[in-house]
Image: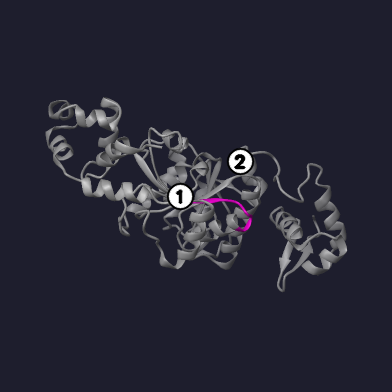
C-alpha cells in the first residue's frame, strides 16, 4: 500500500477538480509515478495534457484535501489503494478506465477474489428479494465473492444473502467512503465494513450525485467475472451494469420472471440480447466455469446426502423441525441443504416454513 510522501503524491494527483481519470492516466503513462509528474516541470507536463490542464495541475493547492484523506487512511481498517499497489483489484486493470486509486473500508484481501456481481431493481417483488438472497447465499457458499452496490432492493438482498452464508461481500458505492447511502442501509453497511469491504473511487466527502452511480457501475462489473441481474425494469440502472459487463468481456446472466411483471422485462430483454438464462446456482457456476457443483455442506460429490434427505422427506409437506427429528441433522445444516435443493428445482418452499419434494425431482 502506498504510504508517506508516495501516498500524498497520488492523492495530490487525484484531488484536483478538472483533472479526471483520463488525464491522470495520460500523465502516469508519460512520467510513471505521481512524484515524477510533479517534478517534471510545466513545459514537460504541458506537452502531455496541454497548457490549461498543466497550470491547473501544478498550481492548485489541495494540501488540505490530501491531509484529510491521509488522516482517514490512518484509521482502523481504512485504506487507500493506488494503481501501483499489489492489493489493487487486478480485474480493474482490464477495463478501459480503471480508477487511479480506491478508498477501502474493511478487508483488502477480498479485492482480488473470484467474484460475481448481483444487481437488480430498487423496487423488487418479494420473489425477487428471495431469489437475490438465496442465489447470493448459495454462490457465496461455493466460494464466489458477492459484489453489489448497496442500493435498496436487490443489491441489499444480495449483500444480506452472502452475509447469511457466513461469507464476505463487497459493496461498491457512488459517494465518498465516509457517506452511507441510502440511510436505510446504515446497519447493513456497518456489517459489510466489519466482515467484508466497502469501496469507493470518489474523494472523501463526495455527496450523493446521480451521475456518480452509473460511473460506479463499471467497477461493479469490472471487478466481477460476471453480472447476474435478478429483476430489472427496462429503465433500470442494472441494465447499465449489464451493458458495461458485456463491453468489458464479462459474462451477463439473468433470471427470467413472469411475462406480466414489469420487473422481469429488463431481464427478458437481456436474455433476448444473448444473456445467459439461469434458473439455479449451478447454472451460474457452469457459465462462469467456476466448478460444476456447490462446495458446501450437503453437496457431496456423489450427491448422496441430498438424495437421502429427499427420501426422508417423501412427497408430503414437512417442516424443518420434523426433518431434523427424522435425519438427526442440525437445523443449520438442513437449512443449507434445503436451500440448494430448492435452487436446483428439487423441492419447493411452502407457507409456514414447510418444504415439499417436487414430483419430477
Please tell me which residue lies in front, 186 or 158: 186
Could you say which quadrant of the image residue 85 lies in? Answer: top left
For mark 2, what is the residue? 287
In this view, the residue in front, 201 or 22, is 201
**x and y percentages locating residue 73 in the rendered image:** 37, 47
- Whether residue 256 appears in this view of the structure is no
Q: Position of residue 188 (x, y in %)?
A: 50, 62
45 is within the stretch colored magenta: no
How far across and down, in percent of the image, does residue 20 sit?
26, 41
The answer to whether residue 96 is above or below residue 161 is above
* Quarter of the image with the N terminus in it: top left
Tell me which residue sits at (53%, 64%) in the image: 261
Instruction: Say if mark 2 contacts mark 1, CB within 8 Å.
Output: no
Rendered residue at 17%/44% (across/down): 61
Residue at mark 1: 77
State which quarter of the image contains the C terminus: bottom right
Say which of 275 and 120 sits in front.
120
Q: Is residue 104 left or right of residue 16?
A: right
Q: Would you say 35 lies left or right of 227 here?
A: left
Q: Position of residue 295 (x, y in %)?
A: 70, 44
The reply, left or right, for residue 36 in relation to residue 315 is left
First along the sequence among labels 2 and 1: 1
Magenta residues span: 164-170
Q: Residues within 10 Å of mark 1 (few under 14, many from 20)?
A: some
Is 166 contained in the magenta span? Answer: yes
Say few, some or many: other residues with alpha carbon within 10 Å of mark 2 (under 14 / 14 to 19 / 20 or more). Answer: some
Color scheme of the displayed model: one colour
Q: Is 229 drawn above or below residue 18 in the view shown?
A: below
Report the Cα–Cα distance between label 2 and label 1.
34 Å
Can residue 176 be seen here? The reply is yes
Of residues 62 and 123, which is closer to you in this image? 62
Amino acid at each position: 500500500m502506498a504510504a508517506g510522501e508516495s501516498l500524498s503524491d497520488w492523492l495530490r494527483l487525484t484531488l484536483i477538480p478538472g483533472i479526471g481519470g483520463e488525464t491522470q492516466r495520460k500523465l502516469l503513462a508519460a512520467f510513471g509515478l505521481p512524484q515524477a509528474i510533479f517534478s517534471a516541470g510545466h513545459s514537460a507536463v504541458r506537452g502531455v495534457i496541454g497548457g490549461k490542464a498543466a497550470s491547473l495541475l501544478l498550481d492548485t493547492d489541495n494540501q488540505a484535501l490530501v491531509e484529510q484523506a491521509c488522516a482517514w487512511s490512518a484509521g482502523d481498517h481504512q485504506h487507500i489503494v493506488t494503481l501501483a499497489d499489489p492489493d489493487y483489484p487486478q480485474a480493474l486493470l482490464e477495463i478501459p478506465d480503471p480508477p487511479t486509486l480506491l478508498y477501502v473500508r474493511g478487508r483488502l484481501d477480498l479485492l482480488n477474489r473470484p467474484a460475481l456481481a448481483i444487481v437488480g431493481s430498487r423496487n423488487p417483488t418479494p420473489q425477487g428479494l428471495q431469489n437475490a438472497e438465496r442465489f447470493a447465499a448459495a454462490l457465496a457458499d461455493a466460494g464466489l465473492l458477492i459484489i453489489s452496490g448497496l442500493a435498496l432492493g436487490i443489491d441489499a438482498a444480495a449483500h444480506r444473502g452472502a452475509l447469511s452464508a457466513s461469507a464476505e461481500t463487497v459493496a461498491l458505492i457512488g459517494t465518498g467512503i465516509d457517506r452511507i447511502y441510502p440511510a436505510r442501509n446504515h446497519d447493513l453497511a456497518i456489517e459489510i465494513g466489519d466482515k467484508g469491504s466497502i469501496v469507493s473511487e470518489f474523494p472523501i466527502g463526495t455527496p450523493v450525485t446521480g451521475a456518480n452511480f452509473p460511473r460506479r457501475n463499471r467497477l461493479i462489473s469490472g471487478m466481477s467475472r460476471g453480472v447476474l441481474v435478478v429483476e430489472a425494469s427496462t429503465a433500470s440502472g442494472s441494465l447499465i451494469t449489464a451493458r458495461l459487463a458485456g463491453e468489458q468481456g464479462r459474462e451477463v446472466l439473468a433470471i427470467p420472471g413472469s411475462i406480466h411483471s414489469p420487473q422481469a422485462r429488463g431481464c427478458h430483454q437481456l436474455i433476448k440480447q444473448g444473456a445467459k438464462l439461469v434458473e439455479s446456482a449451478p447454472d451460474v457456476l457452469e457459465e462462469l466455469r467456476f466448478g460444476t457443483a456447490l462446495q458446501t455442506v450437503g453437496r457431496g460429490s456423489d450427491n448422496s446426502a441430498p438424495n437421502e434427505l429427499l427420501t426422508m422427506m417423501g412427497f408430503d409437506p414437512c417442516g424443518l423441525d420434523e426433518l431434523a427429528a427424522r435425519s438427526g441433522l442440525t437445523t443449520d445444516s438442513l437449512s443449507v441443504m434445503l436451500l440448494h435443493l430448492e435452487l436446483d428445482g428439487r423441492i419447493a418452499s411452502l407457507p409456514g416454513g414447510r418444504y415439499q419434494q417436487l414430483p419430477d425431482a
